[in-house]
Image: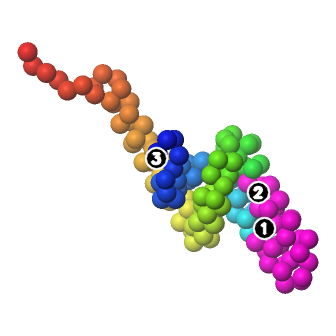
Amino acid sequence: MKNGRFESFEEFWPFYVKEHSKKTTRTLHAVGTTAGILVAAYAVWAKRPWLIALAPVLGYGGSWIGHFFVEKNKPATFTYPAWSFRGDFKMLTKIYAGTMDAEVERVLKEYAEQEQAKQTTTNGHSEPLTVS
């Protein structure tokens, strides 16, 4: 992270996962993203371009409900739109593969370990012991 900004998607991904730690939020994302994809595909197939405008509403509507009312956080889309969009599809793939719950557990465990390490270094144990 440089200047408070993620420099790569790989660096962003754990943050994204943490922001989607509740299964209800992930489910709302999956339903919304899937509905958005299906509506966009139908719009192209049926040659009804006006329907394409509905795809983002479906895709993000449920997702934002999940963030504001379930996670109680700000959607990553507001700060990192491109990486968030990519994250939505990576998460959707993992949800359909049945591996997203394990990914959330892994990332949350890493965050907890990092927080524990920070507390260890800030509660007086960060300075090396010196013998006089």
Residue under pointer 3:
1
Q: Amino acid at mark 2?
A: Tyr
Mark carried by residue 49:
none
Q: Secondary structure at mark 1?
A: helix
Residue under pointer 1:
36
Is 80 drawn above or below residue 55 in the view shown?
Answer: above
Instruction: Report if residue 47 lies within the magenta region.
Output: yes
Q: Amino acid at mark 1?
A: Gly
Mark carried by residue 60:
2
Q: Is residue 105 visible?
A: no
The Cα atoms of the two marked residues, 3 and 1, are separated by 31 Å
Q: Secondary structure at mark 2?
A: helix
In x, y percent, where is residue 112? 44, 41
Q: Residue furthest top?
A: 132
Q: Residue furthest front?
A: 3
Q: What residue is at 84 percent from the left and 84 percent from the top?
A: 45
Q: Residues within 10 Å of mark 1 (few under 14, many from 20)?
A: many
Q: Residues within 10 Å of mark 2 (few under 14, many from 20)?
A: many
Asked whether the residues under the numbered discs 1 and 2 touch, taking CB atoms below 8 Å apart as contact, a structural biologist would say: yes
Question: Closer to us: mark 2 or mark 3?
Answer: 3
In x, y percent, where is residue 77? 68, 52
Instruction: Report if residue 59 lies within the magenta region.
Output: yes
The Cα atoms of the two marked residues, 1 and 2, are separated by 8 Å
Between 5 and 72, the one lying in front of the other is 5
**Left or right: 109, with 98 as reference point:** left
Q: Amino acid at mark 3?
A: Met
Ranked by sequence position, the earlier of labels 1 and 2 is 1
Q: Quadrant of the C terminus?
A: top left
Q: Is residue 34 visible?
A: yes
The Cα atoms of the two marked residues, 2 and 3, are separated by 26 Å
Q: Which residues are magenta?
A: 37-63
